[in-house]
């Protein structure tokens, strides 16, 4: 079997629950805080961070300086992305210190993870695909499938770790490179999970659709 059903676990899933000490290299670099990803885009980006050749800036001021360069100096666009006003962004750029619990720290980190070392991640993806495209995903969501004649496996809360086939790894990487919308990434992931869990030995029948709902934890390993 290529899956681990851990829905009975009472604790919130973390990578430590899923990998052995020998696989410690799969853990997100310690410079990043442990933010669970609830979108496919962010989960892919955080998995990419394991392949960085150097870590991003640590301080908020340095991170903002990097992001402003990436936005071509457009502080209005960056402020919108970070859900702050341009005035607040200017204040953050000059502040000597900001409270650790300030929400903008997490928002900035997510944007850093999204943009840091794009060429490095593309090379990593190419290498992964060239070596068989091994991709594993852990998630918690309401997961099932529905057939035209009625429910075949009612969506229910599951916590699973699955291995995805190479074609799905290629599709997810290509979609992410093309800045595909979250809806497209979600559809690709749903199809990949259905193939790995429900349809390992047969193709989906007419009208059989995988349901992936209420996703609250998602992490890729490759």
Image (tube, rainbow, N blue to C red):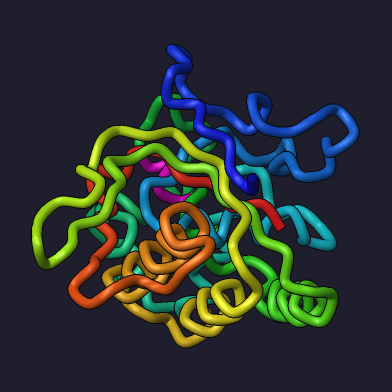
Magenta stretch containing residue 107, yes or no?
yes
Q: Which residue is drawn at 42% across and 55% down?
A: 198
Count of numbered circles on the image: 0
The residue located at (76%, 53%) in the rendering is 55
Q: Main SS type for the magenta part?
A: helix
Is residue 41 visible to us here?
no
Residue numbers of the magenta segment: 104-108
Expressed as whole percent of the image width and height from the top left, the position of residue 206 reads 22, 77
- Could you say which quadrant of the image residue 106 lies in? top left
Q: Position of residue 175 (x, y in %)?
A: 47, 81
Nearer-the-camera pick, 123 or 156 = 156
Question: 87 or 147: which is nearer to us?
Answer: 147
x and y percent of residue 4 in the render?
A: 58, 36
Identify whether 23 is placed above or below 165.
Answer: above
Q: Quadrant of the N terminus?
A: top right
> Which residue is at a point 65% across and 74% down the rendered structure image?
166
Q: What residue lies at 9% left-to-right and 56% top-to-bottom?
A: 150
């Amino acid at each position: 079997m290529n899956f681990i059903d851990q829905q009975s676990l009472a604790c919130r899933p973390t990578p430590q629950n899923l990998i052995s000490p020998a696989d410690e290299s799969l853990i997100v670099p310690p410079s990043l805080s442990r933010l669970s990803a609830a979108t496919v885009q962010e989960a892919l980006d955080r998995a990419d961070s394991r392949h960085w050749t150097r870590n991003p800036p640590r301080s908020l001021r340095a991170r903002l300086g990097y992001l402003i360069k990436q936005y071509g100096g457009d502080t209005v666009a960056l402020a919108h992305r970070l859900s702050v006003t341009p005035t607040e962004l200017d204040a953050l750029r000059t502040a000597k210190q900001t409270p650790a619990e300030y929400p903008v720290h997490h928002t900035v980190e997510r944007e850093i993870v999204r943009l840091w070392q794009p060429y490095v991640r593309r090379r990593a993806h190419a290498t992964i695909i060239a070596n068989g495209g091994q991709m594993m995903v852990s998630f918690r969501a309401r997961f099932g499938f529905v057939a035209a004649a009625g429910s075949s496996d009612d969506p229910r809360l599951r916590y699973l770790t699955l291995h995805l086939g190479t074609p799905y790894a290629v599709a997810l990487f290509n979609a992410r490179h093309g800045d595909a919308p979250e809806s497209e990434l979600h559809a690709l992931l749903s199809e990949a999970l259905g193939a790995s869990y429900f349809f390992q030995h047969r193709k989906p029948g007419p009208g059989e659709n995988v349901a992936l709902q209420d996703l609250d934890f998602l992490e890729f390993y490759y």
